[in-house]
Amino acid sequence: MSGSDLPKGVTRIKEPARSAVGDNAPVEAAVRAILADIRARGDAAVRDFSERFDNSRLDVFEVSTADREAAVAGLDPQTRKDTEFAISNVRAFAEAQLATIGALPDFTPRPGVHMGHRVIPIRRVGCYVPGGRYPLLSAPIMTIVPAKVAGVDEVIACLPPNAHPAMIAGCHLSGADRIFRIGGAQAIGAMAFGTETVPAVDKIVGPGNAFVNEAKRQVFGPVGIDQLAGPSEIYILADHTGDAEMIATDLLAQAEHDVRTRVGLITTDAELARSVSAEVDRQLASLSTAQTAGAAWRDYGEVAVCADEAAMIAYSDLIAAEHLQVHTEDAHGLAKKLRNYGSLFIGELASVVYSDKCSGTNHTLPTMAAGRYTGGLWVGAYVKVATHQWLEPEGVFTVAPPATRQSASEGLEGHRRAAQLRLDRLQSGR
């Protein structure tokens, strides 16, 4: 984003050194070849790619019941309690969300014209569970638990062969019906097309690296996807009441995810902007993940000073950050004025970290400004709202004449005949 693209009243005192959008052509070509091979050779191709990319040669991809139970037994007691705590919170929030999606059995806009909709769970969903540099224990919870709450018949989980055993335990405790040790673009291909051992799914959800993301993009159509996710993002809105130490801590907490994480402060207080920048540098000196977090801050970090609250809101809505924290004097008041974000964290006590791990809202969220048109993964992503209608004779007398005339004016004779036929028969008593 160039300076000329900034809303009026916004000045960036630290700009990202790199663009978050890179050349995707090499990834696109590699993924296309992987998917074509999996479609042609099934398990054999998956096995070859697993050996090539994950240094893993497996005769059997599916995690057995015994291995699932062993993974759960291998959790230390506190980790299991914390995992079940997170599952409970995510489940409770998903159940509350599902309760807001009601069936509409019979709506009558005109006498004799009946319509409505059903809320139908998707039959089979594939959840991609990333391995990453760390065992992200919350990852399977966020994708699998809402699917089970929604009533999905079968939840398939795929995770890299070298994923930490705790990740298998997380998939099991979250309710996955089947778990496969397959990672990367080959997992997306296996779930999209089906193989000899992996069933084809109807929708694929879950974050992953650039190859996973590109694979989801390429299979989309016959198979649904949740979203295309880029590098993680956090922006914080703050005024003169902002706490530099807390803001810097939260920025670095997200920055340690990946060297391409986008982190930013948008503030109306120039002194706070300078203090946060200095505090980030101070904390990096003692942060064990500074190699990653420091690179993210250096290359993708941003600090913007705004003339007033209106400019701060305008710039925040333009960015549409994945995670958006509000550290202002009237945080709830400002939150009501914001439109574009993945998930909102109101007040300095609400940290992204809590949502990332266990508080209950989903951490699978839109990035790269997709928050301008969509929200994050939620229980509603696992159901279809499908409409229906039926007519009584009175309804045909109401809708057939305008439908007939409109069809005729459009030159669609087949439509006109279909609309008129029922009317003619009813009028003739047939």
Image: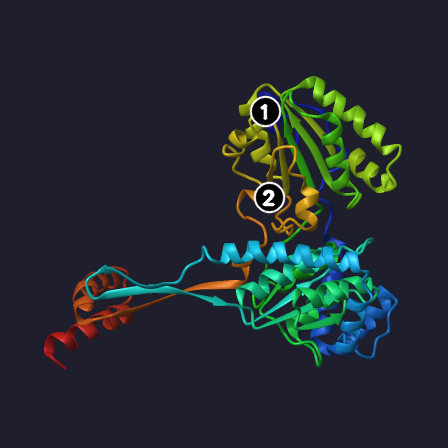
Residue 37 is situated, as x and y percent measured from the top left of the image, at 74, 72
- Mark 2, other Cα within 10 Å: few <14 / some 14–19 / many ≥20: many
The colour mode here is rainbow
Please say whether residue 266 is visible from this viewpoint: yes
Tell me the kind of residue under disc 2. Answer: Ser
Q: CA distance from mark 1 to mark 2?
A: 20 Å
Q: Amino acid at mark 1?
A: Glu
The residue under label 1 is: 329
Residue 222: name its quadrant.
bottom right
The quadrant the C terminus occupies is: bottom left
Q: Quadrant of residue 112?
A: bottom left
Looking at the picture, does residue 40 appear above or below residue 256? Answer: below
Q: Which disc number belongs to residue 343?
A: 2
In the rendered view, tell whether residue 392 sits above or below residue 143. Answer: below
SS class of the residue under badge 2?
strand
- Residue pictured at 26% horizontal, 63% vertical: 407
Residue 117's disc number: none
Select label 1 or label 2 by which is in front: 1
Horizontal and vertical percent position of residue 268? 62, 21
Closer to us: 261 or 213: 261
Compare marks 1 and 2 and give the one earlier in the sequence: 1
Q: Is residue 208 visible?
A: no
Q: What's the residue at 24%, 65% (across, down)?
A: 113
